[in-house]
Image: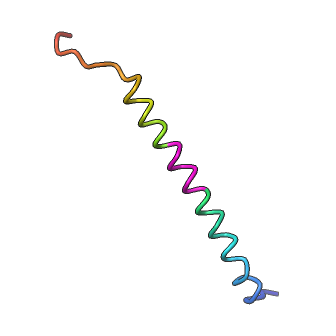
Amino acid sequence: MFNVSLFLQTLPIMGMGMFGIFCVIAVIMISVMVLNKVTGKKKNDDQ
């Protein structure tokens, strides 16, 4: 029913998938931070 050897064979594939998701999330976060720095409005103390 539950084959441990097959489960252990799939762990590296799952690890690569999780690493890929982590990389994509990091790229999105960095691009959002860069866009906020570039297009962010300046804060005025007058208002």
- Taking the image as shown, residue 41 lies to the left or right of residue 21, namely left
> Residue at point 37% right, 23% down?
40
Placement of 38 over or under 6, stated as above or below: above
- Quadrant of the image containing the C terminus: top left
On the image, the x and y values in percent for residue 19 come to: 58, 62
- Taking the image as shown, residue 12 lies to the left or right of residue 26, namely right
Residue most toward the top? Answer: 46
Placement of 24 over or under 16, stated as above or below: above
Q: Is 17 colored magenta in this rendering?
A: no
Placement of 6 over or under 15, stated as above or below: below
> Residue at point 46% right, 42% down?
30
Residue 12 picture quarter: bottom right
Q: Nearer the viewer, residue 30 or 11?
A: 30
The colour scheme used to paint the residues is rainbow
- Quadrant of the image containing the N terminus: bottom right
- Taking the image as shown, residue 45 lies to the left or right of residue 27, namely left
Residue most toward the right? Answer: 1
SS assignment for the magenta stretch, majority: helix
- Taking the image as shown, residue 28 lies to the left or right of residue 38, namely right
> Residue at point 40% right, 26% down?
38
Residue 46 picture quarter: top left
> Residue at point 64% right, 66% down?
16
All told, the count of numbered labels is: 0
On the image, the x and y values in percent for residue 25 come to: 54, 49
Q: Which residues are magenta?
A: 21-28
Placement of 38 over or under 4, stated as above or below: above
